[in-house]
Image (tube, rainbow, N blue to C red):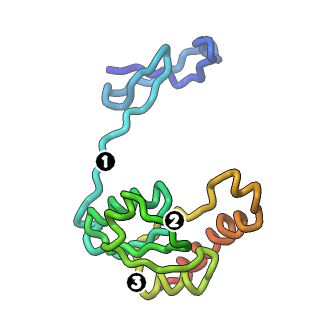
Amino acid sequence: MLVMSVLPVAPSGRNLLRSRARVATSASAGVFRGEGEWRPRMAAWTPDPTFWRDRPVAVTGATGFLGSHLVQHLVGLGAAVVVLVRDDIPPTAITRSWLSRVSVVRGAIEDQAVMERLLGDYEVRTLFHLAAQSQVGVANRNPVATYEANIAGTWTVLEAARRSP
């Protein structure tokens, strides 16, 4: 049996409150790391391949780090993936592994008509919105384009999903 403290711990390791409320849990619920620091143990998760097989899935931001890995995983599960790509960029090793196995729609995330067409034409049932301008230097040099991609783009995606049948 593992006993974990639910009280905040100061950097010195002392409890910030005088009473010591404790919660008893099973050993599989978490692990102690360091002095009194408890972290929940993450249960292994595996997706259900039958859920994803032939499921129409759209991914925005598919050429980014997270998006490219997500698409690779979805393609491996047998999903019917469609990606929104704004710019022609040299393919990475990850994108090369799935580029010929997905449908590619070219357009901007802020374009309402493109987003509605993507969701409607491909009968998308699941949408992963990962498109964003996340580089701080670029954002500082071009704040309007960053706003359009991150804020207006997210609004456009949500509105297109709301209108989608």
Report whether 125 appears left or right of 11: left
Q: Looking at the image, is mark 1 or mark 3 nearer the viewer?
A: 3
In the picture of the structure, the residue carrying the numbered disc 3 is 122
Is residue 62 depicted above or below 4 in this figure?
A: below
Give the Cα separation between the discs numbered 1 and 2. 24 Å
| Image point (70%, 52%), residue name | 137
Q: Secondary structure at mark 3?
A: loop
Task: Residue type at mark 2: give it.
Answer: Gly
Is residue 139 depicted above or below 19 in this figure?
A: below
In the picture of the structure, the residue carrying the numbered disc 1 is 45
Question: Given contact means CB atoms under 8 Å apart, are the residues at marks 1 and 2 in contact?
Answer: no
Quarter of the image for residue 81 reads bottom left
Q: Crowdedness of circle 2 by 10 Å Cα count: few (<14), some, many (20+)?
A: many
Report whether 88 appears left or right of 79: right
Q: Secondary structure at mark 1?
A: loop
Task: Give the number of the disc on residue 107.
Answer: none
Give the Cα separation between the discs numbered 1 and 3. 28 Å
Task: Residue type at mark 3: give it.
Answer: Tyr
Labels 1 and 2: the sequence-earlier one = 1
Quarter of the image for residue 30 reads top left
| Image point (63%, 17%), residue name | 10
Q: Quadrant of the N terminus?
A: top left
Question: Given contact means CB atoms under 8 Å apart, are the residues at marks 1 and 3 in contact?
Answer: no
Q: Looking at the image, is mark 3 or mark 2 nearer the viewer?
A: 2
Labels 1 and 3: the sequence-earlier one = 1
Give the Cα separation between the discs numbered 3 and 2. 17 Å
